[in-house]
Image (cartoon, rainbow, N blue to C red):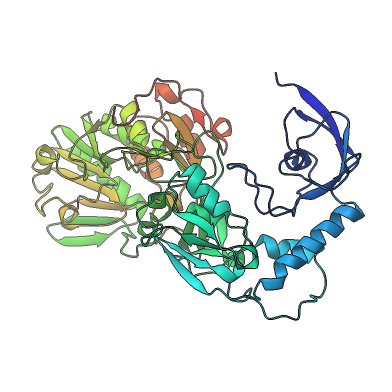
Amino acid sequence: MADMVNVTIDGNEVSVPKGTTILEAAKRVGTEVPHYCYHPGMSSPAMCRLCLVEVEGAPKPMPGCVTTVMDGQVVHTQSDQALKNRRGVLEFYLVNHPLDCPICDMSGECNLQDYVHAEGREQGRGVEPKRVFGRDDFGGDVLFYGDRCVMCTRCVRFMSEVEQDHRLTVVERGNRSVIDTFFEEGLEGTHWHGNIVDICPVGALVSKDFLHKARAWDLAHTPSICDCSQGCNISLHTRDNLVQRIKPRENLDVNAWWISDLCRMDYEWMNRGDRIEAPLHRSDGGSKVLGWKDALQSILKAAERSEGQVKAVASARASNEDLAAFKRLVKGLGGGEIVYRSPRIEKDIPLKGFPQLAVRRDRAPNTTGANVMGMTRVGDDSATGGLEDIAGHDGIVLVLGDALEDQPASFGANAKLYVYVGQHESPATETAHFVLPATTKAESEGTFTNYEGRVQRFWRALDPPGMARPPWLVLGTLAAELGCGEAVRSAADSFVAMGVDAFAGITYEDIGDRGTVINEVVHMTGA
């Protein structure tokens, strides 16, 4: 157990591990000491001077981000001296900071706005013209507004310490200091540069993709999981029933404070408008829209008349609950092999300063879940091919989530029963006897299992289109009617009812918002 020290902060006594900084100790008593340059994932240069606090016995104000607490220490973060220090520092920041708030993408979530509103001067005293730098394109997804920069150097330290690709630096001196790129290509070609927009405390670094797209106060934030086998914790920022952007969500066991640029930009598929919105029954007489009750009853009747082996295609983008319900349905129809396809890149791309985080080779969020449930990966690394035996199968064909975009229009044409459950149609699904609309991860609740066997939850952020329903609900109902499991009404109950040994005894409460590891040894992706 770590050595503990007792410290008094603003009259509140607290015990913290030896070596804890004043700034972090203050959080234990509910006090957020204003700061710019400090970030828990990087070194602390103590250069912004905003976190100066009064320490009894010290000859001068001390920077809270680097000063470690001592036993018996008494700290004042709200004393007259501490407030005067911060007010003076904030005034210096505003000397050259433009009044861009009405047009700045950071407005509404800007630390400078919050600090000045809480502790700054009511009126500025500056009369000299403000320094002007203008806008610079740093490459990649990043624009730099030099006029707004407070020179915290978080972006420079992230690129040098965390990504360990020295693309940014500080040039010039004094009030002419500015962030700049070393090379003509700037941030282009790096894999993690979007994080510097996240950690910029003001609107100096902004995303080209999000530029003037929405106001911070108009966005709803929903916890979710990214779409690669790393399982990064993310937050979906939504407005008008559309995902507007993706931001990282802190989880020190998985991705800390960071996400890859590939993950950050992988959201437009959740906003596609060409969705399946109602159950369809196709026959020689054409297509007919059905209600859910009629659709499920028709599938069960068709299954009774159909003979032959079951062959099934799943998706590694489906949740654990969806895959387990799919497996039960296959079992209820007589059993058969379930395969899935998933895209892969050449190799993992680790974040050098936090190597447990990487752009994983496997680019699907639930390949581990599919593997644990006995499903087999087929096809190539572009998630195509591998379905030749299924395309011409003359028994029962079931497809979950795979749009089959690479498959011929004759896929499943020989099947006695062909059921497709998904979000989008393609030529290969036009021969399906039944087409059932399914929700995406953004429209439902569920879990994924990442590359190391950590089960993590995602929550519903969007309203589903039309009559789309979670696959676990639809498939679970069909399986229950065939005598395989019981019908459930919630994702939490569906998880408990999965019937997979690796997940036995785990509940949504156990998983929480940080995840928990399954009861089985997991082989690393690509090993």
Q: Is residue 182 above or below residue 254?
A: below
Left or right of residue 183, residue 433 in this image: left
Nearer to us in this view, 400 or 214: 214
Q: Return the x and y of residue 128 as percentages of the image width and height.
A: 72, 80
- Res 188 seen here: yes
**Farthest front residue in view:** 173
Q: Return the x and y of residue 214 as percentages of the image width and height.
A: 53, 69
Residue at 74 percent of width and 55 percent of height? 50
Q: Is residue 85 above or below residue 479?
A: below
Q: Return the x and y of residue 462 as percentages of the image width and height.
A: 48, 57
- Res 462 seen here: no
Q: Is residue 502 above or below residue 127?
A: above
Left or right of residue 93, residue 468 in this image: left
Left or right of residue 194, residue 299 in this image: left
Q: Quadrant of the C terminus?
A: top left
Nearer to us in this view, 3 or 317: 3
Q: Return the x and y of residue 314 as percentages of the image width and height.
A: 27, 40
Nearer to us in this view, 86 or 330: 86
Nearer to us in this view, 365 or 16: 16
Total number of numbered labels? Answer: 0
Q: Quadrant of the N terminus?
A: top right
Q: Quadrant of residue 427?
A: bottom left
Residue at 74 percent of width and 27 percent of height? 18
